[in-house]
């Protein structure tokens, strides 16, 4: 094959083209020191000093994962993302020398958007108000159609009174109406015993979180989208889904965070 000048020339041309293509597709990529770019430092903002060291480290870890994913999707070549301590993150974007451009990349992907995580105890007082708002807006029949256990466990008789079931129904011929009226205590609002929203919340293992079974996520989101529920929430608090799925036993759960509405950037 290589005995004639023609075959040798063709082989040389082909090898030259192959290596040229390999060098072009896998060429050296200049870093920040040679190519120039932006050097950004992200730091947890906690002016009130309410966050623990563990909470700050956890926030930086989550922001680190988000930044790596989003910058890779954006197409920045050879980004350097490095954690410094437990509350600071360094981001170097090679080839970007426009400050506004660098900020646009960061802010577009919400890298600097921080919200204060609040303890679930701050939300406890509002849960009963949220439950009543859901019942008043949807009605008992609609809640029953959801197929959820939404009644307090210590009030089983309310189920029978609301839905007409069980053996507790008594005819007028068997009981003296006058005596029943005298024995029954002051009437309570049955709506106070319904828990369509709070019955789906499980206290999370991370401070400031509830765990929602993955199959209940659409129902919880349905409630959160209601204007009545949003009005029942405390003015300075919000409930927001986390991205991480966790397994507990044979079930899968999703985090629902209790956050302050004030954005820290």
Image (cartoon, grey):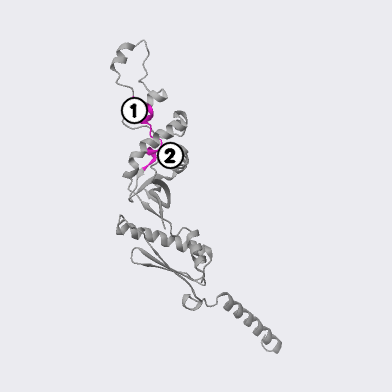
Residue 73's place in the image compared with 26, above or below, is above
Residue 43's place in the image compared with 12, above or below, is above
**Front disc: 2 or 1:** 2
Q: Residues within 10 Å of mark 1 (few under 14, many from 20)?
A: few
State the residue at coordinates (45%, 62%): 67
Observer-nearest of 117 and 245: 117
Is residue 148 highlighted in magenta?
no
Q: Secondary structure at mark 1?
A: helix
State the residue at coordinates (68%, 86%): 9
Name the quadrant of the N terminus: bottom right
Query: Which corner quadrant of the image does residue 264 belong to?
Result: bottom left
| Relative image position of residue 144 (x, y in whole percent) | 44, 31
Query: Which corner quadrant of the image does residue 157 belong to?
Result: top left
Q: Is 179 placed left or right of 161 in the picture?
A: left
Is residue 198 highlighted in magenta?
yes
Q: Is 94 placed left or right of 193 in the picture?
A: right
Q: Between marks 2 and 1, how big is the CA–CA gap?
A: 30 Å
Q: What span is colored magenta in the figure?
A: 188-201
Query: Which corner quadrant of the image does residue 60 belong to?
Result: bottom left
Q: Going from the N terminus, do you reach mark 2 or mark 1 first?
A: 1
Q: Is 37 placed left or right of 251 in the picture?
A: right
| Relative image position of residue 27 (x, y in whole percent) | 55, 77
Name the quadrant of the C terminus: bottom left
| Relative image position of residue 86 (x, y in whole percent) | 33, 63
The residue singled out by tag 2 in the image is: 231
The residue singled out by tag 1 in the image is: 156
| Relative image position of residue 260 (x, y in whole percent) | 38, 49
* Tags 2 and 1 touching, CB below 8 Å: no
Observer-nearest of 119 and 141: 119
């Amino acid at each position: 094959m290589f005995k004639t000048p023609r075959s040798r020339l063709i082989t040389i041309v082909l090898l030259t083209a192959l290596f040229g293509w390999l060098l072009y597709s896998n060429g050296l990529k200049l870093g920040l020191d040679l190519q120039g770019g932006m050097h950004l430092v992200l730091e947890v903002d906690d002016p009130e000093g309410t966050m623990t060291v563990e909470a700050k480290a956890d926030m930086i870890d989550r922001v680190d994962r988000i930044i790596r994913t989003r910058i890779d999707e954006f197409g920045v070549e050879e980004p350097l993302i490095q954690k410094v301590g437990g509350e600071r993150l360094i981001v170097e974007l090679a080839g970007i020398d426009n400050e506004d451009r660098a900020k646009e990349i960061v802010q577009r992907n919400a890298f600097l958007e921080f919200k204060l995580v609040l303890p679930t105890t701050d939300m406890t007082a509002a849960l009963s108000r949220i439950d009543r708002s859901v019942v008043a807006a949807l009605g008992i029949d609609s809640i029953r159609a959801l197929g959820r256990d939404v009644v307090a466990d210590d009030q089983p008789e309310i189920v029978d009174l609301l839905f007409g079931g069980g053996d507790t129904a008594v005819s007028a011929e068997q009981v003296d109406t006058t005596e029943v009226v005298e024995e029954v205590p002051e009437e309570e609002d049955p709506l106070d015993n319904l828990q369509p929203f709070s019955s789906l919340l499980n206290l999370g293992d991370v401070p400031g979180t509830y765990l929602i079974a993955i199959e209940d996520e659409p129902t919880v989101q349905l409630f959160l989208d209601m204007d009545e529920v949003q009005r029942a929430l405390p003015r300075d608090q919000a409930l927001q889904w986390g991205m991480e799925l966790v397994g507990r036993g044979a079930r899968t759960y999703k985090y629902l965070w209790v956050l302050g509405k004030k954005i820290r950037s």
